[in-house]
Structures are given as C-alpha cells and as structure tokens.
Image (cartoon, rainbow, N blue to C red):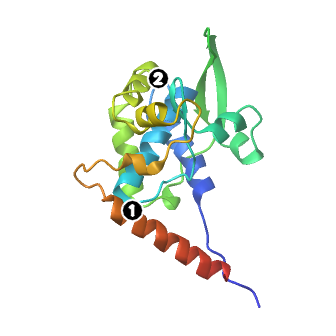
Amino acid sequence: MKRPILINHNREKLLNALVYFSKNTNLCGKTKLFKLLYFLDFIHFRETGRSVTGLDYYAWDKGPVPQDLFHELKQPDKDLKDTIALLKQSDDEDDKLCKVIAKRPFDPKYFSKREKKIMEYLSFIFKEALAKNMVEITHLTGTPWDKTMKERGPGKKIDYSLAIDGSKGALTSEEIKERISEVKEVTQIFEGR
C-alpha cells in the first residue's frame, strides 16, 4: 500500500524567490539576495510560525547567511544553474562582487498571498538598497543575528524563534510552538509514523 506523501515546495519557493528578487530589485548581488531571503523567511516566521524557503541561517560577520545556499552557489545543482547566473562585476577585498541574473520567469503558483505580499514589500523597500546598508540593518541591536552573535557566538545557527518580537501581526511564542507542533504531527501522519 502506497503511503500519501506530504509535498514540500521549499526548493521551488527558494528558486522562485531568487528569480523574483533578482528581477524586482536593483544591484542584486549575493549578499543582498541573502539578506532579502533572510527578511522573507524571518518576517513570515514571525507572522505564521514557519519560514518560506526552509533555509537555515547562520550568524556570519556580514550578517545572516543561508550557509547551504552560499556553498551551493559555488557548485550549483542543475535546477539552480537553470534558474540564476552570477555575473562577475568587480573584485572586492573580501569577495568577488556578482550580479544575480534570473534565467527563467518567476512562477507565483508556489507562494501564498502572504508570501507574495512580503516579497513585494521587501522588493519595494530594498529596490535600490546597497548590500552594505542591508548588512547594517541585520546588525541592529535586538535582531536575531545580534542575539545569536551575543548569546552563542559567530558561525552559529540563528533560531527562527528569535524573530518573535511582539510587533503587530506577530504570533506569540506559544502560538509559534503550537504551529510547529501541528506541522510535526501532520508530517508524522503523512509519513505513517
């Protein structure tokens, strides 16, 4: 007997978020892209108890970095190669500056209205922003990156629950825990555990 499969569209969401941000912001290099993904995931988590892309972020010197994506960009899988290209712009003392170029159209079907609204908002706010300014924003006192650096140290995974801040529209920590528990329960049901 075949068990039902819980469909997870995190990879499709990630690839399409890369396309969306590269097409809807200017000066979109790797660092800016990483910050946009971070804001997307942490804002969505604060409001719903789950991230959009499923990425884990780590507290690096230049702010939160989706470490797996960072490494994958060096040797991209076929689907990532078919989605974006990195066009070398210039050399910087720390890293080669690259522009992210979309190689295919954005497919909105994988996103909820809330997710699309957050992407639109971020693209509007950061359309002309430089990566260095976005890094400064992630370093502000009290941000999840700041808390992780102070409490756990550099290179450590940033806990999504640090996005809970009591702001308007944010879930409480109890609501987040309940939603995470519900997701685990549904996953176990679909996996037949």
Task: Say which mark, if any, is on residue 131.
Answer: 2
Residue 26 rendering spot, x and y as whole percentages = 45, 26
Residue 82 rendering spot, x and y as whole percentages = 71, 43
Instruction: Tell me which residue sits at (60%, 10%) in the image.
Output: 92
Q: Furthest residue to the bottom?
A: 1
Q: Is residue 66 left or right of residue 113?
A: right
- For residue 116, say whether it is visible: no
Q: Which amino acid does label 2 sit on?
A: Ala
Instruction: Tell me which residue sits at (42%, 39%) in the image.
Output: 144
Pointer 1 residue: 176
Query: Could you tell me which secondary element the residue under label 2 belongs to?
Result: helix
Residue 2 rendering spot, x and y as whole percentages = 75, 86
Q: Do the residues labelled 2 and 1 touch (CB within 8 Å)?
A: no
Q: Which of 82 and 155 is in front in this view?
A: 155
Residue 112 drawn above or below residue 93: below
- For residue 26, say whether it is visible: yes
Marks 2 and 1 sit apart, C-alpha to C-alpha, by: 30 Å
Residue 183 drawn above or below residue 34: below
Rate crowding at label 1 as few (under 14), some (14 to 19) or many (20 or more) other CA atoms within 10 Å. Answer: many
Instruction: Tell me which residue sits at (62%, 44%) in the image.
Output: 104
- How many numbered marks have been drawn onto this rendered protein structure? 2
Q: What residue type is labelled 1?
A: Ile
Which is more N-terminal, label 1 or label 2?
2
Task: Say which mark, if any, is on residue 79.
Answer: none
**Quadrant, the C terminus:** bottom right
**Quadrant, the N terminus:** bottom right
Residue 179 drawn above or below residue 45: below
